[in-house]
Amino acid sequence: MSRLWDWAYSFVVIPLFWAALKSIALVNAKTRRGIRGRVTLFASLEQQVAALPHGARVWFHSSSMGEFEQAKPIIAELKKRRPGTQVVVSFFSPSGYEHSRKYRLADVITYLPFDTRKNARRFLDLVRPDAAVMVRYDIWPNHIRELARRKIPVLIANATMRLHTRRRLPLARGFHRHIYNMIDDILTVAPSDAEAFRRFGLTHPSIQVIGDTRYDQVTARSVEARKRRIIPPTITEGKRVVVAGSTWPEDEEVVIPACLRLQAELGNVLLVVVPHEPTEEHIENLERDLAGRAPSIRFSALNEYAGESVVIVDSVGILLVLYAHAHIAYVGGSFRQGVHNVLEAAVFGIPVLFGPKHRNAHEPIMLVECGGGFVTGDEEELHRTLKNLLEDGAARCASGERAARFVASHTGATARFLEHCERRLAART
């Protein structure tokens, strides 16, 4: 049966997937970048690997930038514990690859080749890892199969799986059981994830709950973020700052009107809007929407600040630092398809608000349960929650303290993961 799954995947699924990507690339610039970026993949990889000295080598694969943030604390701690260890980092998404090319702790940074048998063999012939770490969910069967054939240990970090996943539907169940049985350690975020993996009836991998390395990563990054004050104190002094992070238009249609009402009622509220995709078109649409309703200024023009009540952030990579300025945070995606990272806000000890679509991850739910987070279903509820928190400083501080304690209580997954990884490395080196 396993041969049938391998054949169907390699000779039916992959050709269809490639054809779909080529079609999407005709209208999607990001997909085009991903295809073009792989044209010189093996030549570039061969050159990078040739420059490496002999020594233990670990390959980390992430789908995109968000997943790679979860790998960073593992890589940093691995480098401390085993200074000679080389790290190869790969990405499927062009956004992850492009934003991480200067990551200093990686010895090699590359795209993952498309998941054909030939590409998997060629990739591993060049990389020659002593262990492979897949971050969260991006599992490519031919690469996993080739790793297993070479007896290279494979670990999943921050593994998640819904109890009622579609992967256990009749045809999909057998295929995924076959793939997961080639993995050595499935190290999950929560007990429910571990239970979901066990329901596949897996016989080979060790399945253990170790927690989520994102808590370690946001804690480490927050230390540096507190030192950076990228909004001048003269702008925030005497104001109550609401940072709306990773927003989509659906979020902005709710957040902006609610905050404009608060500005009219309280007078000293500064709204900082951080779009998830700060394209020029999106920024201009926000400016047109605010025209005649509230004065706004772009973040890049803050040296010309003249009392505007809305700051529109037209830069990327600074959201965590901006949360350090906030009294309250709203995290976007929750009026669209699923809330973005709430931990980046919670670590600063501030209340975290988000919309109804927040069950795509464990931490928003747990944050609400501990009193550090609030779900708001519409503009009216968001306005009411914001107003209560801004007017009641004691309640706001108490909620923020609960959010900070929540993050602190869940750190330590990095060390637990490395116990498993180092044991696998020791068996090979």
Image: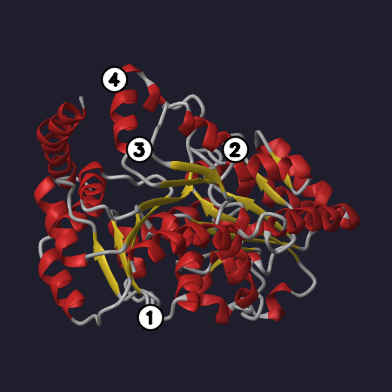
Residue type of the residue flagged with mark 3: Tyr
Residue type of the residue flagged with mark 2: Pro
Label ID, residue 180: 3
Question: Element under label 3?
Answer: helix
Label ID, residue 109: none
Residue drawn at the location 58% of the way across and 34% of the way down: 192
Q: Are the two marked residues, 4 and 2, in contact with CB atoms closer than 8 angstroms? A: no
Q: Are the two marked residues, 1 and 2, in contact with CB atoms closer than 8 angstroms? A: no
Horizontal relation, residue 134 to residue 10: left or right? right
Select label 4 or label 1 by which is in front: 1
Task: Give whichever of discs 4 and 1 has the lower sequence position.
Answer: 1
Quadrant in the rendering for residue 92: bottom left
Q: Are the two marked residues, 3 and 1, in contact with CB atoms closer than 8 angstroms? A: no
* Label 4 sits on residue: 171
Horizontal relation, residue 360 to residue 153: left or right? right
Q: How crowded is the residue under tag 3: few (<14 C-alpha within 10 Å), some, or many (20+)?
A: many
Q: How crowded is the residue under tag 2: few (<14 C-alpha within 10 Å), some, or many (20+)?
A: few
Task: Give whichever of discs 1 and 2 has the lower sequence position.
Answer: 1
Select label 1 or label 2 by which is in front: 1
Task: Give whichever of discs 4 and 3 has the lower sequence position.
Answer: 4
Give the distance between the C-alpha atoms of the residues marked 4 and 1, in whole angstroms. 44 Å
* Label 1 sits on residue: 84
Task: Give whichever of discs 4 and 2 has the lower sequence position.
Answer: 4
Q: Is residue 294 visible?
A: no
Residue drawn at the location 71% of the way across and 60% of the way down: 408
Quarter in which the N terminus is drawn? top left
Task: Give whichever of discs 3 and 1 has the lower sequence position.
Answer: 1
Estimate the x, y position of residue 18 in percent, counting from the top left: 13, 41
Q: How crowded is the residue under tag 1: few (<14 C-alpha within 10 Å), some, or many (20+)?
A: some
Q: Is residue 247 visible?
A: yes
Label ID, residue 191: 2
Quadrant in the rendering for residue 122: bottom left
